[in-house]
Amino acid sequence: MTPSKTHPFRKKWGQNFLTDTNLLDRIVRTVDPQPTDSILEIGPGDGSLTEKIFPLVQEMAAIEIDPLLIKHLSIRSDLKGLQIIHGDVLLQDIEQIPISNPVRIVGNIPYNITSPIIIWLIEQLDFWDDAYIMMQKEVGERLTAKVGTKNYSRLSVVVGVYLNMEFCFKIPPEVFYPKPRVDSAIIRFTKKANPIVPDNQYIQFNKIVKAAFSKRRKMLRNSLTGFDFPEEIKTEIDFTRRPETLTISEFAKLLRK
């Protein structure tokens, strides 16, 4: 979302408006919109980022849940031709949005729906190329953490099966209105050429990873006692290791029968 001190921000939608022109310009430079791009913006607010990207691309759509902001966007002459969609992004199919896909996605989302947004991206892998999502910095650090570090977590693993994640830059609370209580960050998502785990095994994979990280200070032989792994796997993966030391590919080996 973008700045408007006259707009009555809605706590129920987690609205925080960006108010810093230099930051908005930095986001545009990071996304690097191209003349052939189809851009989907999630949470355009009153259009301060939209107005910078829209003239640079072939076409653009924006999804906004707030009817007051929808009205504001729809009467702006400089945004004529922007496809404005009133609704909840989690209920939208990218394929049905009236611009060409695969799209490139830019989003300043309510932080309480960060995980659902990531699942939404995974469910629609065929219809987007890359995504720049603003989120709470700590969540971004967990997503992008390297194996063996304290931030490496269940989130790093279960999302990393499908997506590559890059921490672009940190954003301080002072550039928002109203000011959030946390630092924010822009995370870039791209798709893995080949998912590490087949779709039909993902639920079981998620269960294994959840169990392992639920007792992250314990060895795998203690946290994964509820699973029956073949001896072959136990000789390949040392079960005296802790979960934060396993790569995503090593976790995937635990699925072998």
Image (cartoon, grey):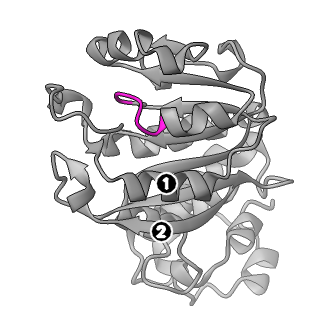
For label 1, the crowd category at 10 Å Cα-Cα, with few meaning under 14, some 14 to 19 and many 20 or more, is some
The residue at the point 48 percent across, 22 percent down is 63
Residues drawn in magenta: 45-50
Three-letter code for the amino acid on which mark 1 is drawn: Asp
Q: Residue at x 24, y 36 (%)?
A: 14
The tag on residue 112 is none
Residue 59: percent from left, percent from top? 70, 24
Neighbour class for label 2 at 10 Å: few (<14), some, many (≥20)?
Answer: some
Note whether residue 162 is visible.
no
Outermost right residue: 194
For residue 25, the mark is 1
Outermost residue toward the front in this view: 77
* Residue marked by disc 2: 169
Is the stretch drawn in magenta largely helix, strand or loop? Answer: loop
Specify whether 173 is left or right of 98: left
**Magenta span has 193?**
no
Q: Nearer the viewer, residue 193 or 221?
A: 193
Location of residue 121 by image quarter: top right
**Mark 2 is on which residue type?**
Phe
What percent of the width, then of the height, locates residue 32? 67, 52
Q: Secondary structure at mark 2?
A: strand
Q: Secondary structure at mark 1?
A: helix
